[in-house]
Image: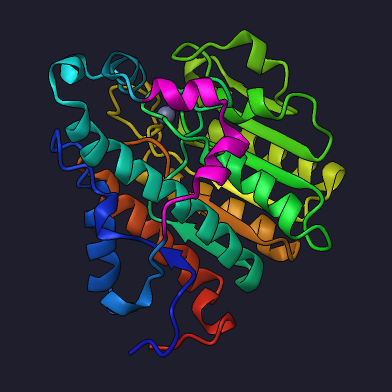
């Protein structure tokens, strides 16, 4: 059995049980344990970010506005939030999201230490300094970038965000508009939410998925591969944040893309291979994708990466 924890972060309270929407995290955790590579003690448990951390990435006005159910209803896009007591929404939705935000930061710190880290949640890429949206309340990606740059200046000076969720990551794009310490690659379906033109201008390397061919396996993989390899060559990042949304899978009602399970495995492998072969620490966040089949696909992909690159051997974790 595992002698040392793996750099994977999870907490049972990640799960938003409210709408029966988010069994995703629990199921991924269960699949990983069932693989036999991990035990219940193999995972790191995060704490929520401190109020100071939150004030670093969000305006006071925005944080105060989260006390209003009407505001939360708009961000979460669930119609009946205004009819519920705020204390209930806070406990059932905001607290899990806060914990996942802390998990993203912890996974990033573990990545710096071990070469890789995975948060079995997070990836709230629509949230930014002044607002949230698209089910994203707290800007965990922005918080990672700020923490890495300020706490580890000798190790992290150039951060690459590779955002492969089906939606445009307008949150981190607004927060790091034209910041030369941050290189953003974003491959997204151009025809769906949020269509944020202002944020689009701060994507360093956009991969606009506009035609049906680009939303299928082969063309998609070719497009992201050339964007990633060229960006690595030009920017030479010393830290990578991988926003690995799986709403680009076929059948996803929000992503409207057409990738197979095999393409998701190849995609994740490509991103990890590029970071690992360049010796750059990488943290992976799960972001969107809530079909029933996603948990099994995500855990299969995580196990594939771990096996393919010998990630547990590298950090001295054996089973
Ligand atoms: Zn998405």
Query: Measured from the top left, where is residue 97 in percent x and y?
Result: 36, 42
Most common SS among magenta residues: helix
Residue 201, compared with residue 104, is above or below; it is above
Quadrant of image for the C terminus = bottom left
Position of 27 with respect to 304 (left or right) is left
The question of residue 237 being in magenta is answered with: no
The residue at 45%/46% (across/down) is 101
Quick one: 189 or 281, which is closer to the camera?
281
Is residue 281 toward the left or the right of residue 24 in the image? right
Residue in the image at 71% along x and 30% along y: 176
**Residue nearest the observer in this picture, 174 or 256:** 174
Q: Quadrant of the N terminus?
A: bottom left
Q: Looking at the image, which is closer to me, 92 or 189?
A: 92
Region rendered in magenta: 47-66
How many numbered circles does the render carry? 0
Residue 88 higher or lower than 149, as above or below: above
Residue 167 spot, x, y in % from top left: 48, 24
Image-based side of 256 in relation to 268, left or right: left
Q: Is residue 260 visible?
A: yes
Residue 167 visible? The answer is: no
Q: Is residue 61 magenta?
A: yes
**Is 25 above or below relative to 127?**
below
Name the image colouring. Answer: rainbow
């Amino acid at each position: 059995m595992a002698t040392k924890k793996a750099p994977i972060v999870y907490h049972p309270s990640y799960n938003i049980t409210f709408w029966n929407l988010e069994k995703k995290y629990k199921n991924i955790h269960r699949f990983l344990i069932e693989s036999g590579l991990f035990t219940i003690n193999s995972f790191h448990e995060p704490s929520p970010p401190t109020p100071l951390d939150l004030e670093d990435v969000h305006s006071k006005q925005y944080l105060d506005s989260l006390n209003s159910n009407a505001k939360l209803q708009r961000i979460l896009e669930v119609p009946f939030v205004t009819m519920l007591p705020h204390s209930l929404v806070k406990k059932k939705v905001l607290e899990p999201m806060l914990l996942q935000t802390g998990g993203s930061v912890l996974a990033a710190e573990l990545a710096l230490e071990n070469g890789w880290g995975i948060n079995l949640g997070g990836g709230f890429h629509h949230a930014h300094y002044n607002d949230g949206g698209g089910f994203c309340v707290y800007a965990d990606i922005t918080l990672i970038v700020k923490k890495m740059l300020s706490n580890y200046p000798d190790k992290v000076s150039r951060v690459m965000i590779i955002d492969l969720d089906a939606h445009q990551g307008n949150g981190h794009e607004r927060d790091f508009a034209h910041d030369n310490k941050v290189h953003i690659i974003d491959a997204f379906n151009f025809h769906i939410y949020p269509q944020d033109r202002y944020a689009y201008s701060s994507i360093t390397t956009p991969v606009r998925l506009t035609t049906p061919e680009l939303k299928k396996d082969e063309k998609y993989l070719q497009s992201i591969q050339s964007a990633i390899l060229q960006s690595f060559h030009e920017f030479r990042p010393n830290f990578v944040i991988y926003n690995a949304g799986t709403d680009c899978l076929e059948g996803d009602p929000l992503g409207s893309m057409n990738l197979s399970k095999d393409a998701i495995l190849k995609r994740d492998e490509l991103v990890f291979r590029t970071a690992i072969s360049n010796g750059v620490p990488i943290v992976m966040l799960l972001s969107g994708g809530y079909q029933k089949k996603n948990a099994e696909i995500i855990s299969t992909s995580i196990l594939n990466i771990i096996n393919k690159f010998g990630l547990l051997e590298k950090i001295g974790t054996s089973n």
